[in-house]
Amino acid sequence: MIFAHAFIGLIIGYFLTIKPINSKLYTKEKRLLYIFIAGIIGSIFPDFDFVFVFLLHNKDLHRHLLTHSLISYIIVLVGFSIFKYVRKRSIDDLWQRIFWAFWLGAVIHLFADLIATPVYLFEPISNISMVLHRFRANETDGLRKYIFSPYMINEIIVIITGLVLLIMRFKNCKKELMILLGLLGTILLMAMIVLVPFF
């Protein structure tokens, strides 16, 4: 996926907020907002490897670093589980849901990428990439070809689903809805700027 990762975070946020949040921290609206933001950030987090791609001028590094490795997120999950077990008092429900929103967003991002592009899921243990159906394009028409491919239908479905669920959850919270729409707009703008060299 190229455009819809952040919208996966909206879907995760929606499902993590179906059950009321058992927390006294912040207002109800802020609790919802923070969980959705964590889902969005988690859903785009693996693509922060683009920083290294640009710094090292090496496009081949994308999806080859630890941000796209399932091993990294398993280690984080084990660490969180140990922290919960060792801690003398329970972790607030809001913080647990923020963790799960971020973690699920990042892990689902990896599997969304697997649909069309190779991902090194077990880096650094294994240097073997995995892909469900490789999208083939050459350097000159790569992104244009993707936009007019069947893969784009998946992205459109995720984007529409995410927006509908966002509006359903925040229909009575206009301020928080505007904050999230602004964040999504900023992420899409940044994605377009990063992708300009690929057009």
Image (cartoon, rainbow, N blue to C red):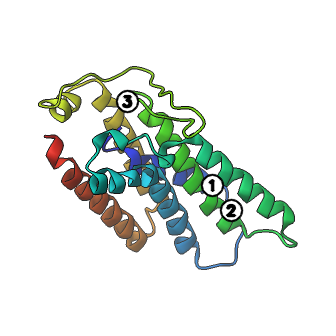
Position of 11 with respect to 23 (left or right) is left
Relative to 18, say whether 129 is above or below: above
Relative to 192, say whether 90 is above or below: below
Could you say where residue 4 lies in the image, as x and y percent from the top left? 35, 44
- Of callouts 1 and 3, which one flags the residue occurring earlier in the amino acid sequence? 1
Q: Judging from the image, what secondary structure is the residue with disc 1 in?
A: helix
Q: Which residue is mark 1?
A: 100
Q: Amino acid at mark 3?
A: Thr
Q: Please say if the residues under marks 2 and 1 sit with CB atoms less than 8 Å apart.
A: yes
Q: Please say if the residues under marks 1 and 3 sit with CB atoms less than 8 Å apart.
A: no
- Of callouts 3 and 2, which one flags the residue occurring earlier in the amino acid sequence? 2
Q: Which residue is mark 2?
A: 96
Binning the other alpha carbons within 10 Å of mark 1 as few (below 14), some (14 to 19) or many (20 upward) gives many
- Residue at image point 50% right, 60% down: 36
- Residue at image point 60% right, 62% down: 98
The CA span between labels 2 and 1 is: 6 Å
Q: Which residue is mark 3?
A: 117
Could you say where residue 38 lies in the image, as x and y percent from the top left? 52, 61
Q: Judging from the image, what secondary structure is the residue with disc 2 in?
A: helix
- Residue at image point 61% right, 48% down: 73
Quadrant of the rendering where the N terminus is positioned: top left
